[in-house]
Amino acid sequence: MKKDVSRTTAVLTAEDIATIVGLRGVEHILDELIDRLRDALLTFDPDRVHSPARAGFQYEEPEVGLLEWMPAMELGRVAAVKTVGYHPRNPTRKGLPSVMATTSVYDTATGQLLALLDATLLTALRTGAASAVATDILAVDGPLSVGVIGCGAQAVTQLHAISRVRPVERVTVLDTDPVVAASYNRRVAFLDRPTTVVNPEGDTRLLADVDVLCTCTSVDVGKGPVLRDGEHRPWLHVNAIGADFPGKQELPLPMLERAVLCPDLPSQCRVEGESQWVQPDRIGPDLATLVKHRSSYEPYRSVLTVFDSTGWALEDLVVAELFIELASREGIGSTVTLQRTATDPFDPYALITP
Ligand SMILES: NC(=O)c1ccc[n+]([C@@H]2O[C@H](COP(=O)([O-])OP(=O)(O)OC[C@H]3O[C@@H](n4cnc5c(N)ncnc54)[C@H](O)[C@@H]3O)[C@@H](O)[C@H]2O)c1
């Protein structure tokens, strides 16, 4: 008797993701994601969670861009691979986001594809959530004055996620593209926080006036840093998320050298993040260590700290599983039978033989 081993794959389109967010509320989802990410970091065991180095294509035609694949696996349970495109000219030339992604989730018992998700919003949410986890541990207590340099897509979830772990009193932003800077206020209007736009020459004024700074620019390789060094509050915490490729840099070197520099994934940050610019012995505790030993690191709230965020595939696995669970609970999304192997497993021609 031949056994039917076909299994369906869950498909979550961008519209399905939006429906889930609409039903649950983006606040609720961000809070849940921040909690889940914190839990994943708290229990992170490199012997059980594997995330081999991401790889990809970098090219200059037909457009300047990057296509990368980012794998993560929890041993004995599940694996996910996010494929992410980064095309910084997308917004102005094509009306598309710079960062567009899809995630595939696999059953590690069989290799079958369990789910396929649009991961563009998911990437923005998980990048915000990672900054929220770091900010919660490292930022000064109390209402914050927040600065944002680079006001694109990630800048929205950076500010939103931070507002879930600390009250935000006011916001000062800067972008080299005045149109993007001017529209930021509208995109974060739901937060109802006074937002001031300064021009790029106002970088040192912005730096002097904030408790938390998020740098989320599409600065090109070799064109950083995106701000000049200058006076700042002694307790400044920076979420530096834009340096995520060899040669990219957002923060000035002297600032990096005097900061406690906390990478998301040290091996990746040493190659792609702000950590690539400092001596290895200048690199401080990573995100999982901060979470596991939170009380030991909270004293860093009084000094300059930098979260070196390059984006970790574990974050993509956590956010994908959250949305798969919510979709199943709410009955959203569709299924396809992509991998029907209903007949003799030793006969690849079985499906085409009458
Ligand atoms: N760390 C992570 O996990 C992670 C995740 C997603 C994206 N990223 C990175 O974050 C960055 C932003 O991504 P996005 O999706 O928001 O891109 P985006 O294109 O939507 O926005 C980037 C903005 O930065 C501005 N900018 C470019 N150079 C600048 C400079 N020198 N000073 C001030 N503003 C400048 C651009 O005008 C643009 O408005 C990219 O570099 C991307 O690779 C990191």
Image: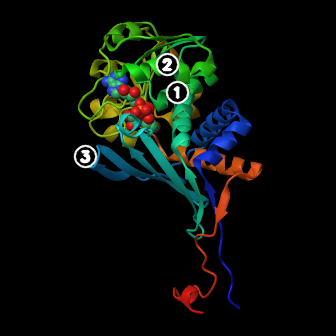
Tell which of 230 and 114 is nearer to you. 114
Residue 277's spot in the image, x, y percent? 28, 31
Mark number, residue 300: 2
Question: Which amino acid is tagged 3?
Answer: Glu
Question: Neighbour class for label 2 at 10 Å: few (<14), some, many (≥20)?
Answer: some
Mark number, residue 60: 3
Q: Earlier in the sequence, mark 1 or mark 3?
A: 3
Question: Neighbour class for label 3 at 10 Å: few (<14), some, many (≥20)?
Answer: few
Measure the C-alpha gap from mark 1 to mark 3: 28 Å
Here the colouring is rainbow
Cβ of mark 3 under 8 A from ligand 1: no
The residue where tag 1 is placed is 156
Question: Neighbour class for label 1 at 10 Å: few (<14), some, many (≥20)?
Answer: some
Cβ of mark 2 under 8 A from ligand 1: no
Residue 49's spot in the image, x, y percent? 53, 52
Q: Residue at x 39, y 32 (%)?
A: 242
